[in-house]
Image (cartoon, rainbow, N blue to C red):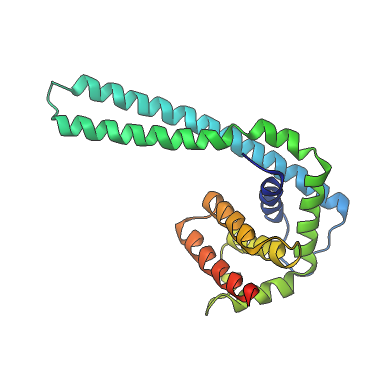
Amino acid sequence: MHNNRSLSRELSLISLGLIKDKGDCKLNKFQIEEIFESALDSLVDHCRDELDNCESELENASQKILDSELQEGVDSSFSNVRDALKKSLTKIETVMNTLSVTLDFPKLIVSSCQIDIREDVNQRIHNIINNLKIIDSDIDQAMDGWRLKRLPRIDRDILRLAYVDINFLNTPVAVACDEAVNLANKYSDDQGRKFINGVLRRLQTVKLQ
């Protein structure tokens, strides 16, 4: 289930993607509110798309199970039928896991109207755009021979949000890192997830020293 802080982090991430990635960007509260509404629309649309995909995947998996049953005893070996069933069941399990998250989106709509979530998103975005050069410089030092600007935008913003959690909002380091990993699992690719994990571990080490 989404908790309020997790939801505000996700909405902050989507909101940052709608803002120019420059250190001199200045936004007032009204502008951030407009960006928040656009981010919320994007997240709701994503949830609806996920539900449509789940429906399609379930239909596909069910059809494959039916096909494997029809093939059994005709010209397919037992092992082939078994493998087909295992793949279909694995697909169904993946779909059900996706559904368990996506079906939370009515709660997302209700929660997004809460003042504390909107204020939290506003605070996170302000902290990032007003301190972007310092944040990026500190993250660069934990990049181990790499530069933040060379990462995809979504990965940069996930790291920036984790930095703000740790250094501006006094979020426990382990919690901030876990939340960043959850965002990376949802929005980044395999390479990005591994890289973000590595940088977070180094940031965590620096913070604990």
Residue pictured at 62% horizontal, 64% vertical: 159
Residue 15 in picture, x, y percent from top left = 71, 51
**In the depicted structure, whether residue 40 falls above or below residue 180:** above
- Tally of marks: 0
**In the depicted structure, whether residue 34 falls above or below residue 139:** above
155 displayed left or right of 120: left
Residue pictured at 17% horizontal, 22% vertical: 72
Q: Quadrant of the rendered structure where residue 181 is?
A: bottom right
166 displayed left or right of 178: right
Nearer the observer, 188 or 138: 138
Nearer the observer, 179 or 173: 173
4 displayed left or right of 99: right
Residue pictured at 48% horizontal, 27% vertical: 55
Residue 50 in picture, x, y percent from top left = 54, 35
Residue pictured at 76% horizontal, 65% vertical: 168
**In the depicted structure, whether residue 202 falls above or below residue 119:** below
Residue 132 in picture, x, y percent from top left = 74, 69
Where is the C terminus found, in terms of image quarters? bottom right
Where is the N terminus found, in terms of image quarters? top right
Residue 10 in picture, x, y percent from top left = 66, 49
Nearer the observer, 186 or 205: 205
